[in-house]
Amino acid sequence: ASITVPLTNLLNAIGKVKIVLRYMIFWTILNWGLTFFFIKWFGYNGVAAASFLVAASVMLILPEVRRFVEFSFIGPIWKQFVAAVLMGLVVLLMGHIINSLISLLFVMIIAGVVYIGFLFLISKKEFMKMYRFVRTSIKKEK
């Protein structure tokens, strides 16, 4: 939804309602159909699998939107994606030590430090700008 809504709103705003209607019908049929079959095959986990595939199908609308408006899909998210992959690898490598809530908390803290640390390394300027914004917002609340 975080990608679909702005893209469909953009198409609606420029008068391409028929395109949006086509995609909405496609996503509805895909959602109902995949959920029905995946629940039969995978049980309740089929709902998650179907939701994932429907969410991934949003990539189909990107070329359609790019026909009307030029934008970068990867540009704004690549740093966070790489940081999330690194964090995931750390959790995967440290997963064997999780045997209590304390060790889980430890791995969570390490994973968070890896994520934030990597983001800080590759985008210090943006990170500091965001930090100042949050700090200023908190001060205004007091």
Image (tube, helix red, strand yellow):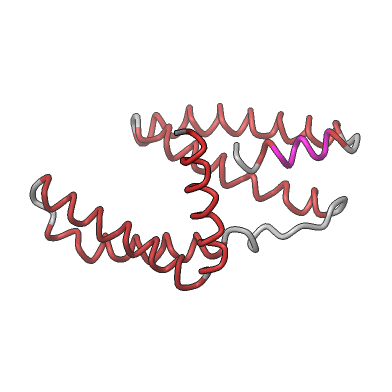
Which quadrant, please, contains the N terminus?
top right
Which quadrant, please, contains the C terminus?
top left
Residue 124 placement (x, y as % from top left): 51, 69
Residue 74 placement (x, y as % from top left): 63, 61
In this view, the residue in front, 104 or 55, is: 104
Residue 63 picture quarter? bottom right
In this view, the residue in front, 40 or 132, is: 132
Q: Give the residue at x 60% y 40%.
A: 2
* Relative to 84, 77 lies left or right: right
* Relative to 138, 97 lies left or right: left
Q: Give the residue at x 28% y 65%.
A: 90
Residue 128 placement (x, y as % from top left): 51, 62
Q: Magenta includes 72?
A: no
Q: Residue furthest bottom?
A: 121
Residue 106 picture quarter? bottom left
Q: Is residue 1 above or below residue 67?
A: above
Q: Give the residue at x 65% y 63%.
A: 75
Q: For the stretch drawn in magenta, what is the main secondary structure?
A: helix
Residue 19 placement (x, y as % from top left): 82, 37
* Relative to 37, 64 lies left or right: right
Q: Give the residue at x 73% y 46%.
A: 61
Region rendered in magenta = 6-12
